[in-house]
Structures are given as structure tokens and as C-alpha cells.
Image (spheres, rainbow, N blue to C red):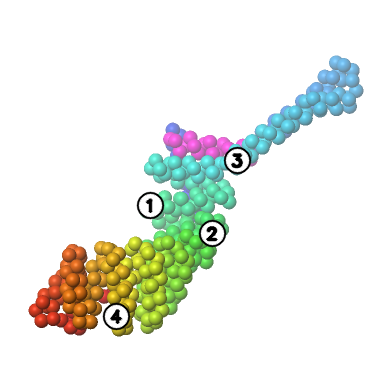
Amino acid sequence: MDLIARAASMTVHAASPSSWGASRVNHAAKAVRQRNPSDYLEPILAVFIGAIVLSVVLGWSPIASLVIVSALVAVPAVKAWRAKAAKQRAIARQAPKAAFNLGNVLMELGQVAGARAAYQRAINSGHPEWAPKAALNLGILLTEHRDVTGAQAAYQWAANSGDTEQAPKAAYNLGNLLNARGDVAGAQASYQRAVNLGDLEWGPRAALNLGVMLKRQGDLVGARAAFHWAMGSGHAEAAPRAAVNLGITLTQLGLVAAAGAAYQRGVDSGHAEQAPKAAFNLGVLLAGQGNVIGARTAYQWAVDSGHAEWAPKAVLNLGVLLNGQGDVVGARAAFRQAIDSGHTEAAATAVNNLATLFRHGISRHQAGKMGR
């Protein structure tokens, strides 16, 4: 939908704060566009009238009178007019910023219609800085108030603006919006656009989301590329998540060694949520390869993290691993720790494992354990 047409349909009451602010913004913008003709005529008339007076009263020649009056009257008048015009131009240049700031204030006050109108004025100005910012904020505002069509138009405007700061975030937000609407192709295109813009904040986030979408569609090769890009970005949030997702994807592709390296990247990130999950998955992967020492180290890392989800699962699997190596004492201690964790699934499985172990011992094939 045309944003200009949408703004034209908006009405604001004269007594409201938004109407007052909007009138100030509009007045500033019109100051330069609609100059008073007297601004041009006043200095000219002053010169001629002054010359006539001197010529008649003092008997000076018209040329001499004109020169003298020009020096005394016209030059200061022209300077004053230039100063006035410069001030008006400065005010006009600030109008888009004022509209943007007004929109922010009104949004904080919960005055949606006024904020929407103010942002639209800034957008309509086409200002290279404030119009993209206003379009992005308008998209956020309309998303919060479930005007999906309007939000999509606003985000699209900001994404197309070419602004190096606002366009990537707008493309990312647009991808999220379209993804929520079930527009898979549109969402993927928007995420890819955000990635291509190379922004260090929104590019990795977009690559992560793109990878998740591609994986869900069964495109493991495409997902692998997206996750790898996000992981390599070093983004504090997106990179660790991408590392875990990449490990899972590579495992599904049968690339076990590469999967282990990806999980290790997740562990090394130290991310409070993703590192313990990566350590647990790495333990499962290595145990499946028969790498007992590596699996034990990975499980212990997850256990030591104290994570509410992955520590109990890891200590349960560690108990199974130790029992398989004949370390019954270590296995019992691990199962008790899993029970004490209070984790519903891990504790229940640990109870069964411990009971069986006390009765007649269990093999690694009999013991219940947790998968990724």
C-alpha cells in the first residue's frame, strides 16, 4: 500500500499534542517553499525610495543618490534577508527530524494515530537520514498493533532506502514478518537481502533465521551455508546458535568430523544457553563414534555449566558412559546427580537406571540415556 496515500487518510484533532507538533513541522517545511514576495521587494523598494528622497530634497543626482542609498540601506537589508532565508532553510531541514522525534514521543505516550502520522511526514520528506529511520519505526509500531499490511509497506520502504543502518534491520524485520505470515519465499528473500547488505548486527541474525527456514524445508545444503556464514560472523548471539544448528545439520549430512568441529565452536563461545547444548550434543556425537574420553569431557563440561536443561541430561548420559566402561561407582554417582537435578525426564530415567544397576548391573545397551 502506498505510504503517502495512507498518510493522507489520517486525521489528527487540533487540540491534541500530535496536531500541535505536526502544525509546527508543517510550518517549518512551508517556510522555504512559500516565500512572501515582500521578502524580495522590500530591499529593492527601500533603495529606490531612498534615492528619490535624496535626489528631490538634497538635489543630488539620481545615480549618486542610488549609490549612497544602496550602501546605507540595501546592503544591510539584503544581509538581513539572507539571514532570514538561511534560518528558514535550517528550520525546513530540521522538519523531518522534528517529525521523527515527535513520532517517538507520541509512540511512548501510546498515541498511535499521532505517532503514525508524524512518522509518515518524516517519510514523505524523503530526507536521507530521518525518512528511513521513521519508516523503520513506523513498521515496528504497526507490527505491534497488528497492521501487517502497513508494517510490510513501511519495512519495505526502509529496506529500499539504501540507508546503511536502517535498511539491514528493516530487511531482517520484514523477513520475520513475512515468515510469520507463511510467505516462505518472501521471508527468505528478505533474510538473504539482509545478509547481502553485510551489516554486522542484522546480517548474522538473518543468516541464522534463513538457515532454520531452509533446514525446515529439507534444504540441508543451503542451511549449512547459512549457518556457516552466521557462525563465522562472530556475532555474540547468532554465532553460537548457528554453531549448534550447523552441528546438527552436518550430522544429518553424515559429515561427523565437521559436525564435531561446529559443536566445539559452540562450546568455545561460552554462551550461557548454547554452549551447554553444544557440549551435550558433542558428547552424544563422540560417544556414538566410540570416543569415550572425548565424550566424557564434553558431558562433564555440560554438567559443570549447571544449565537447567542440558546439565541433567549430560550427567545422565555420563552415568551410562561410565557404566559401560565398568565404572559402577561413577555411574551410580552420576545417576544420583541426575535424580537430584529435578529434571523430569532425566531424573525419571536415572531412577530406572540406578534401580537396575543396584539389582544386577546394566549394560550400556540396557541403560536409558538422552539424545540431542
Label 1 to label 4: alpha-carbon separation: 50 Å
Residue 92, numbered circle: 3
Query: Which residue position holds label 4?
Result: 292
- Which of these two is toward me, 269 or 82? 269
Q: Is residue 343 left or right of residue 238?
A: left
For the residue marked with disc 4, what is the amino acid? Val
Residue 21 colored magenta? yes
Pick whichever, 191 or 142, lies toward us: 191
> Between residues 337 and 253, which one lies in front from this camera angle?
337
Q: Tell whether label 2 touches label 4 (CB within 8 Å).
A: no
Q: Secondary structure at mark 4?
A: helix
Q: Look at the numbered discs 1 and 4 and tell me whether their residues touch, using CB distance below 8 Å.
A: no
Q: Amino acid at mark 2?
A: Asn
User: Going from the N terminus, do you reach mark 3 or mark 4 first?
Assistant: 3
Separation (CA) of disc 1 from disc 2: 22 Å
Q: Nearer the viewer, mark 4 or mark 2?
A: 4
Q: Is residue 183 left or right of residue 162?
A: left
